[in-house]
Amino acid sequence: MKLVFLGTGGSYPTPNRNVPCTALKYKGDILLFDCGEGSQRQLMISDLSFMQVDKIFITHFHGDHFLGVPGLVQSMNMNDREEPLYIYGPEGTVSLLKDLLSKGYFGAGFPIHILELEPEARLDFDGYHISTFRADHGVPSIGYSFQERDKKGRFDREKALDLGVPEGPLFSRIHEGKSVEIDGKVVSPEQIVGPPRKGKKIVYTGDTRPSQEVIDASNRADVLIHDSTLDSSMSDRAMERGHSSTAMAAEIAKEAEVDKLFLTHISPRYTNGEELEDEAREIFENSTIPDDFFEYEL
Ligand SMILES: [Zn+2]
Ligand SMILES: [Zn+2]
């Protein structure tokens, strides 16, 4: 799976950074977290197909996080999409998006399912689940945690053959955790299959002040993508406006013991993010401010 940062700026776009949108490509699906204005063009510039987007998760209804939805939906329609599209968001999502998508002389020729989620909701999908948590931003806002299901341990083919297990259906029986009998001897899965491998966890906060909910949700995540609108000299202003500073985001990453921190929603006042990145790394070493189109494989 890979993350593609399509919009790493906050509030309004600049020549360097578009407004928030982060894509997660997982197997054949593309999930979008937020979909600010112009996200469809960012998708077209990237090597992702906008037609393959099948779920959009909106954190809240400030324009920089959702105004890309109608344009994307219209382009999908003009390209004869038939597959359903699912759009999720916090309280208010259904009435707001239904209204927005009904504007103009336009009707989508494919099903669009719009669903409202409470904080601490859980949605199960093939191979992973998404859970939500409350973000602290002054308007109804939720963050999202993607959690891949744990995977079976590695199957040691050589060892299986050494123990006399013939190649074929018995291999899958053992991999599924069942013992088999070979010439009167029991061969158990523990002899051949390694320990289960932990699924990946990715947490996307959207706009938020530092909060305990974010720390709890991102506990030991592989990746935390956190609001980092301003540098530390403007922490007070960040708090006033419902955002986090770089240092605050780094403190959260440290406390939650995540593996990797990506700082996004960078204010248009910064021409590049280097000084912010240094600030974060002093607190949490594995911090990166991604540019638009930065890709990260997990
Ligand atoms: Zn924003
Ligand atoms: Zn906002």
Image (spheres, helix red, strand yellow):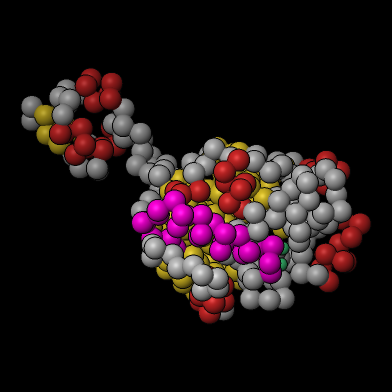
Image quadrant assignment for residue 134:
bottom right
Q: Is residue 42 magenta?
A: no
Left-right relation of 31 to 230:
left
| Position above or below: 130 against 294 | below
The image quarter in which residue 229 lies: bottom right
Residue displayed at 63% across by 64% down = 67
Q: Camera-side residue: 274 or 292? A: 292
Whether residue 228 is visible to the viewer of this picture, yes or no, is no
* Above/below status of 86 relative to 32: below
Left or right, 84 with respect to 168, comes to right
Residue at the spot 28% in from the left edge and 25% down from the top edge: 157
Residue 52 appears at what percent x and percent y?
A: 44, 48
Q: Quadrant of ligand 1?
A: bottom right
Q: Position of residue 79 (x, y in %)?
A: 44, 51
Q: How many marks?
A: 0
Image: magenta residue range: 62-86
Residue 85 colored magenta? yes
Pinpoint residue 183: horizontal percent, then vertical percent. 8, 27
The quarter holding residue 100 reads bottom right
Q: Is residue 64 left or right of residue 41?
A: right
Q: Is residue 80 visible?
A: yes
Question: What is the x, y in percent for residue 262?
Answer: 68, 47
